[in-house]
């Protein structure tokens, strides 16, 4: 079997609905079997793919986010964001974005953001007279901020695959994440003027103060995580463990909203999510190993450089490839497969691996908002009780600000590299 047939088999399996991890494993196993390679190679590479200390951070960040949701902390965050920016035209749209920025510092996953805050945000916007399409669209778009602002599960996976500092990746995501938030708030302001959306409520110092006090301890979570990493107190993995311990402390002793039953349910949800992610990483590792062993990355790099040596054109080509793959493939699998293939090209062009990581993750986040995969859209379809197709059309206009930020980050590397350069280099 050739590499081309293996890739074709992978996409056929995914098109007919086979889970991505199973599709990756089956296509890889078919290549190994038909080329007379020992089947133990598959198992050895799958095990090696997840035998990494930084990957321990994945279940802990997932657990921290789940604990925050279960402890009712998302409501406090939403109320604080409402008191902070709800006075603007289209106030709840701005609250939607602001709450996502805050929650991003706790969960690190777009789907967790959409599921955790989405129900609260869409319900509040509907009750205040906002169009359902607008509510779904801004909720979907703002959820993609989560994996850019640290902590970020996709950045952890990329850091492991690319052998790049996760601390630098986390700091590189801060400014891009804020740029995404600002661009979406500009879009909300434009929509609000056009459709005459109301201010949610007038600004009140007392309301701001009371909601701030109620949300103060949850707001400390991103400070503990990011400050600990930047200050050299924690490694990213240790920061994830600290986030879980702090979440447990809030839920058990401060707010008393967690009990044994909730903790067990949250733990089982975390086990299920982690198992799915690790299975995808393991399966995509053997697929990526086959591509690397057959020098696909080298041939691909040479082919692209033969087409043109213009850095701008090559960057646009790389961006287009990631965007297209992101339409069809789950984020973690795409990172594991594309990084060994595209990173050598980027390095040849003089692109820092940290900068390239931010570009790749933002590309793939846009993929979460587009069919046929569009995991965030599927989640919001259930949360908002609207058809998937309607979620697609509702989200489409909000791709404009996200793509604009992607272009700026791609061609102005200082936007993502300034902070890690100041802190680490």
Image (tube, rainbow, N blue to C red):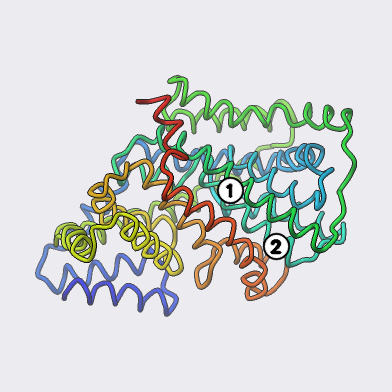
**In the shown orientation, is residue 18 left or right of residue 106?**
left
- The answer to whether residue 50 is above or below residue 303 is above
Q: Earlier in the sequence, mark 2 or mark 1?
A: 2
Residue 300 in the image: state x and y as whole percent.
21, 63
Outermost residue toward the left?
Answer: 36
41 and 294: which is toward the camera: 294
| Quarter of the rendering occupied by the C terminus | top left
- The answer to whether residue 339 is above or below residue 399 is above
- The answer to whether residue 291 is above or below residue 343 is below
**In the shown orientation, is residue 139 left or right of residue 228?**
right
198 and 1: which is toward the camera: 198
- The answer to whether residue 212 is above or below residue 401 is above
Q: Quadrant location of residue 233?
A: top left
Q: How many marks?
A: 2
The secondary element bearing badge 2 is classed as helix
Residue 122 in the image: state x and y as whole percent.
76, 58
Q: Residue at x 66, y 44 (%)?
A: 69
Q: Quadrant location of residue 305?
A: bottom left
183 and 215: which is toward the camera: 183
**In the shown orientation, is residue 392 left or right of residue 335?**
right
| Quarter of the rendering occupied by the N terminus | bottom left
Q: Is residue 283 visible?
A: no
Q: Residue at x 66, y 50 (%)?
A: 116
The residue labelled by disc 2 is 136
Residue 369 in the image: state x and y as whole percent.
56, 63
8 and 191: which is toward the camera: 191
The residue labelled by disc 1 is 180
Q: Quadrant location of residue 299?
A: bottom left
The secondary element bearing badge 1 is classed as helix
Q: Is residue 293 visible?
A: yes
Between circles 2 and 1, the one closer to the viewer is 1
């Amino acid at each position: 079997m050739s590499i081309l047939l293996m890739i074709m088999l992978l996409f056929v399996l995914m098109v007919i609905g086979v889970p991505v991890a199973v599709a990756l494993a089956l296509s890889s196993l078919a290549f190994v079997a038909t080329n007379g390679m020992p089947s133990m190679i598959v198992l050895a590479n799958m095990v090696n793919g997840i035998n990494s200390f930084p990957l321990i951070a994945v279940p802990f960040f997932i657990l921290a986010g789940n604990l925050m949701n279960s402890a009712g902390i998302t409501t406090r965050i939403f109320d604080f964001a409402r008191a902070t920016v709800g006075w603007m035209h289209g106030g709840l749209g701005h609250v939607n974005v602001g709450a996502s920025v805050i929650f991003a510092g706790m969960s690190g996953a777009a789907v967790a953001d959409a599921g955790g805050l989405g129900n609260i945000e869409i319900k509040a916007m509907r009750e205040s007279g906002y169009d359902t399409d607008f509510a779904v669209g801004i909720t979907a778009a703002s959820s993609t901020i989560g994996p850019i602002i640290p902590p970020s599960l996709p950045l952890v996976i990329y850091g492991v695959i690319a052998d790049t500092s996760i601390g630098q990746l986390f700091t590189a995501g801060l400014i891009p994440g804020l740029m995404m938030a600002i661009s979406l708030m500009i879009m909300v302001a434009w929509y609000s003027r056009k459709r005459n959306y109301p201010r949610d409520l007038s600004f009140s110092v007392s309301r701001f103060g009371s909601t701030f006090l109620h949300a103060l301890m949850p707001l400390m979570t991103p400070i503990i995580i990011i400050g600990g990493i930047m200050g050299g107190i924690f490694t990213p993995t240790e920061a994830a463990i600290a986030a879980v311990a702090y979440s447990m402390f809030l839920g058990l002793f401060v707010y008393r909203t967690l009990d044994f039953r909730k903790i067990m349910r949250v733990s089982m949800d975390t086990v299920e999510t982690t198992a799915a992610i690790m299975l995808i990483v393991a399966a995509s590792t053997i697929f990526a190993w086959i591509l690397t062993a057959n020098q696909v990355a080298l041939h691909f790099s040479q082919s692209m450089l033969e087409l043109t040596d213009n850095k701008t054109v090559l960057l646009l080509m790389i961006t287009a490839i990631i965007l297209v793959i992101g339409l069809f493939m789950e984020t973690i699998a795409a990172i594991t497969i594309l990084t060994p293939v595209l990173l050598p090209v980027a390095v040849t062009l003089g692109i820092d691996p940290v900068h390239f990581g931010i570009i790749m993750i933002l590309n793939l986040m846009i993929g979460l908002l587009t069919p046929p995969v569009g995991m965030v859209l599927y989640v919001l379809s259930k949360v908002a009780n609207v058809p998937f197709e309607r979620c697609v059309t509702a989200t489409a206009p909000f791709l404009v600000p996200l793509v604009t930020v992607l272009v700026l980050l791609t061609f102005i590397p200082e936007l993502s590299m300034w902070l890690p350069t100041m802190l680490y280099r």
